[in-house]
Amino acid sequence: MLRLNGHPSGRHFLQIPGPTNVPDRILRAMDHPTIDHRGPEFQAMALKVLRDVRQVFQTVQPVVIYPSSGTGAWEAALVNTLSPGDRVLMVETGHFATLWKKIAEKIGLKPEFIVGDWRRGVDVAAVEARLREDKGQAIKAVCVVHNETSTAVTSDIAGVRRAIDAAKHPALLMVDTISSLGSIDYRHDEWGVDVTVGGSQKGLMLPPGLSFNAISEKALAASKSSTLIRSYWSWEEQLAMNANGWFPYTPATNLLYGLSEAVDMLMEEGLATVFARHARHAEATRRAVRAWGLELLCVNPAEYSNSLTAVLMPAGHDADAFRKVVLTKFNMSLGQGLTKVAGKVFRIGHLGDFNDLSLIGTLGGVEMGLAVAGVPHKVGGTQAAMDYLKSVASGGAQAHARAAE
Ligand SMILES: *Cc1c(COP(=O)(O)O)cnc(C)c1O
């Protein structure tokens, strides 16, 4: 039974891979009376946040901020750059790639899907081969998910860029970074990405409600001649208004205060340190999973995600029954398996506002939950994670940071 009555003491452990735990500093930054979004105080804040948020995308190009969930930014990326009937090449890394493809279909594009088995990232060679075949350059965009949150698999975006260049193909490159931004190294400019899609509620440590498009010059040029219908999502008005610190419609004022604080926090820690921290927690988690004798969904070590881990349940055991035990007994939410892997997989989110001890609490809850739910496993996963974190803390740290680069 869920304990619905009474207040459980201590903090809830929100260890789904987003939304993530919102740190007190961000909660306080948002705890303001809402101000006039046409007034000078707002303008100064907006100019700062529109400038600084670019650092998180590792870009000097404009970033548009929508008051929407990430799904809106997916649609925005497509409707601003493409025309009805355009072909787009997408890759079935998992649930989120599939949802993005469905949007492409609904708005009148012709997506081609490179099928996948939900255990690997983007097959860069397959992308290159398909683009080489496309002599007439009918494909207008390649759209991929950097960190596939349904499978805990991270794809090689620099590799996708090289594949497009090797095929000498002019297609735009669009990348969903909703569960990697601010957690896993991502470089909009250096990797030649044309539109980067982001969301507020994962690595950025904010509540849900903001989404992002980082826009290259090439994407902006494409938007001038593309003809898909757009109004709310249109970059043109956003960019014109943003230049002076304004928005074309009421922005999510208080979330923008939170975003400003989140960017400050990431920059104070330093992106390299943030990425190394996520790599450390991901490695510790994988060591725990192996010690439990359980299997990772991701089959390629080069593609292990640093923001979450997806774990296969032993045959005959339901992941959702296990997650329910963890929630009721230990007040922790774990991520469910989505669509194709429903009931077969549970996901441990270790991204955002997180440290070594929050990870040990999380893994302790998983390990106790496995025992209480009667899931066959070996004890000692949490200990294996502690051993790893101890070794990093007592000098392996520099070696670890180098390894994470
Ligand atoms: C969470 C997530 C989304 C969906 O974002 P919403 O905010 O729920 O619309 C899309 N892509 C990825 C990779 C995600 O992790």
Image (cartoon, rainbow, N blue to C red):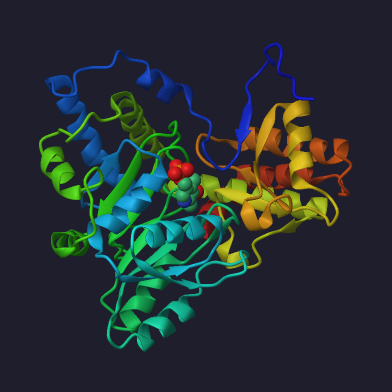
Q: In which quadrant of the rendered view does residue 374 lie?
A: top right
Residue 268 location in percent, x, y?
Answer: 37, 35
Q: In which quadrant of the rendered view does residue 186 lie?
A: bottom left
Image position of 72 with respect to 294: above or below: above
Give the residue at x 87% y 39%.
371
Q: How many marks?
A: 0
Residue 386 location in percent, x, y?
Answer: 72, 42
Give the residue at x 68% y 59%.
297
Residue 275 visible at all: no
**In the depicted view, which residue is nearer to us: 101 or 289?**
101
- 372 vs 125, left or right, is right
Image position of 131 with respect to 178: above or below: below
Residue 51 location in percent, x, y?
Answer: 21, 40
Quarter holding the N terminus?
Answer: top right
- 279 vs 146, left or right, is right
**In the depicted view, which residue is nearer to us: 181 or 218?**
218
Image position of 141 with respect to 81: above or below: below
Residue 137 location in percent, x, y?
Answer: 28, 81
- 79 vs 344, left or right, is left
Image position of 173 with respect to 313: above or below: below
- 63 vs 315, left or right, is left
Give the residue at x 76% y 55%.
290
**In the depicted view, which residue is nearer to us: 270 or 330?**
330
Residue 190 visible at all: yes
